[in-house]
Amino acid sequence: MSDQTAKDKRPSPEALLEEASREARGHLKVFLGAAPGVGKTYEMLLSAATRRRDGVDVVIGIVETHGREETQALVEGFEVVPRRRLDYKGRVLEEMDLDAILDRAPQLVLVDELAHTNAEGSRHPKRYMDVEDLLAAGIDVYTTVNIQHLESLNDVVAQITRIRVRETVPDAFIDRADEIEVIDITPGDLIQRLKEGKVYVPKTAQRALTHYFSPGNLTALRELALRRTAQRVDQQLLTHMQVHAISGPWAAGDRVLVVVNEHPKAQALLRYARRLAERLRAPWVALYVETAHALRLSEAERDRIADAMRLVEKLGGQAVTIPGSELATDIIRYAEANNFSHLVIGRTKRSRLHEMLFGSVTYEIVRSAGNIAVHVVTGEEYETIPAKTVATRKTSPSLEINSYLAGSGLVVAALGLGLFLTRILEVQNIALVFLTAVLVSAVAYGLWPAIFTSLLSVLAFNVFFLPPYYSVTISDPENVVALFFFLVVALIASNLTANVRRQAMVARRRAKTTEDLYLFSRKLAATASLDDLLWVTASQVASMLRVRVVLFLPDNGSLALKAAWPPEDVAEQADLAAAKWSWESNRPAGRGADTLPGAQRLFLPMRTGRGPVAVIGIDSDKAGPILDPDQRRLLDALTDQAALAIERVNLAEDVDRAERAAEKDRLRSALLTSISHDLRTPLASILGAASSLRSLSGLDAAAREDLLSTIQEEAERLNRFIANLLDMTRLESGAVEPNMSLTYVGEVVGSVLRRAEKMLAGHRVETELATDLPMLRLDAVLFEQVLFNLLDNAAKYAPAGSTIRILSWRDGTAVHLQVLDEGGGIPPEDLPRVFDKFYRVRKADSQRAGTGLGLAICRGFVEAMGGTMESGNRDDRSGAVFTITLPVPATEDLEPES
């Protein structure tokens, strides 16, 4: 067995990796139905009961019986994990408890209604995501889903039933299922179940019979379910063959492969393959094998390949490009590895002599096809490029002439070196010098210059080194044989070397593309703003594809030009129309497309799984299609990465907007609550005292003094509230500009204690200020307000008769000041939020106290003066402690101003 044959018999590495990844996960079995009521849940419970009797640990994660008695009877006897209860807008909803199932760790869990949307507060928004976690934990899962919930079939089902299902499951999730079991009953039986009330209640059943459950709808949905399952089974068969290195095809189902190239009849070949696939009701793929020959294609030939690949997509097929070296071998290997049963190729009516001399790819494919049915489509001027020859392509005339001149120069150099070496070497060894020149020519310039160098080397070797010298005549028959084999070796060596050179060029080009894509992904990952992201994308696409680029994004209901390369590029009206059509239809438009081909640019939608996120437009100065197949694939790779990055930025902005909106609503609600309470309470006291003074004329002096004190205290309280609102407004707008000057902290403490004397009348106040406190550079008015708010806060939360302490000390280059009370302290969960605007810790009697602005203002003022402020609880007893840290001014700052 040859090395290549042995290699072909090896299992596919990709298939082995996929198989290994499945072994580390739980086993997923999907019970797929065409419509509600076919018995998916019932069949899932029956299968689970069988597994349980076999000793498998089975639990029910969630099963919806919908009141069906026969289904409820099957639930009996299973262990059911209690559901999680969630409050949602005043209602209590029950959801599957994912964490409880993971903690229970059964061998098999039953999860009904895979497409269900979870209530807010659940770990995941969708139930299939919960199933992903269960599988990742190694737990087997049985689940149910209807065909209308598959994402790819959502539009098809809506067209059939006139009802669009909002809850969908990605097809990729279903494709990862280890088993899919179709629960199938005839439309007549399902309609009968509906009439008997086994699916819906009678009134709902009657509406369903009129609309969704018509015989035509059920037949169409049944076919969709069977076809989708057949596709999955076909993929499982292909994976099995690749894992076990089984050469195909297995005739379990028809698959059509058509080989295309740069010849004019390629599109006719594609249409034939499409008709064949339609007759067989089989999927079909168009294959282009990119060999070293692709480097020598003309622009027109590259355009024909691009047109053919675009036609494949229009006809509903799949376009695939693979690298290769031996055309026939690569085609057969791909067909066998992917289980194709039919192969469509083309050939011309060439002579038998031509095929004997140069070979025929068509003949080699037919000879090697094995069990694959080969369809040979004949026609003039059509032939897949032969394996043993390469047609001459005209590139640059000057480049071709230079290559042949360089080959001649190599022969001259070899001749000079050979004449010098004849003094020390035999003539037979001189041939190696000319052979070296041939190899150098093949490596540097390709096949045909190397062949020219071979012939010229043979001529030079004959004339200068074989008797009679300086003549083309050969006198010795042995020299004729030697010269012949020298020519054969030179031709073979030049051919092999030229092939290696072309393959190396293809490999370098692919490596360069891969490296550029990797670097582009790194740039996208490091870019946070949308504008920078668009500029990176435009410049990368322009540099890699040598085109001009414009990028359009939605803006206030229309498309707007957001980036361009070169930056001064603008879009004409026709371009805007093409871009808008591409965005709305999610299809290409503009130059080279079927729609609006008169536009200057080709516009392509940039899509993610959620839909289009942008439109990219490209153009160049060359005539004809802008991109060849390689460039189109490269553009798709670039735009796919860019689209995901744009979606990432958009999602981040959406989250930020949502958080800002939620914070705005919270602040608005808190402000209204605060105003309604903190304005109404003092106003009510003031109005009550004032009305008493007016209506009760017989009050003695003490009563009148008490009422006047109430009015004054409540007015001061109201004034503090208004001042807090104004101070917070100044902080939010950045209008606070501290009037910094050297101030002694003790003076500020004494001033604030005199100001707060009435407020602290029911508490003892102790001060303990270090004697070595330096002068601090701060705003005395703002700092007094900070201390006043802290003392006000302590007075509210500390019981009457308790002690409020003010401590201060120096620690190196900072001065610390603490305010400690003997209240209940700050609950640990509230510590991170005590400085938030309008946030108020509940008092022991569950009544809120204060406005929720005082501490926020304290921190804002302290930070404006260059300090920091922290909150915490006392270690020696209950109570809160607030610590202010202010920097000690440098020595030069303490010098008096002149």
Image: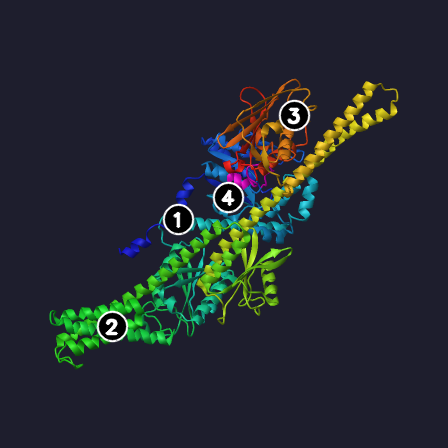
Between discs 3 and 4, the one toward the N terminus: 4
Look at mark 3 in the image and give the residue it sits on: 753
Task: Report the Cα–Cα distance between label 1 and label 2.
Answer: 50 Å
Please tell me whether residue 699 is drawn above or below residue 644 in the rendered image: above
Q: Nearer the viewer, mark 1 or mark 2?
A: 2
Q: Nearer the viewer, mark 2 or mark 3?
A: 3
Give the left or right position of residue 405, taking residue 41 as reference.
Answer: left
In magenta segment, residue 244:
no
Please tell me whether residue 861 is drawn above or below residue 440 in the rendered image: above
Between discs 3 and 1, the one toward the N terminus: 1
Q: In terms of secondary structure, where does tag 2 sit?
A: helix
Q: In terms of secondary structure, where does tag 3 sit?
A: helix
Dots 1, 4 in contact, CB < 8 A: no
The residue type indicated by label 4 comes to Glu
Task: Report the Cα–Cα distance between label 1 and label 4.
Answer: 23 Å
Q: Residue at x 48, y 57 (%)?
A: 638
The residue type indicated by label 2 comes to Leu
Q: In terms of secondary structure, where does tag 1 sit?
A: helix
The residue type indicated by label 1 comes to Ala
Tag of residue 15: 1
The residue type indicated by label 3 comes to Leu
Give the left or right position of residue 359, taking residue 298 as reference.
Answer: left
Look at mark 2 in the image and give the residue it sits on: 410
What is the crowding at mark 1: few (fewer than 14 residues within 10 Å), some, or many (at least 20)? some
* Location of the N terminus (image quadrant): bottom left
Dots 3, 1 in contact, CB < 8 A: no
What is the crowding at mark 2: few (fewer than 14 residues within 10 Å), some, or many (at least 20)? many
Q: Which residue occupies the foreground of this view, 781 or 788?
A: 781
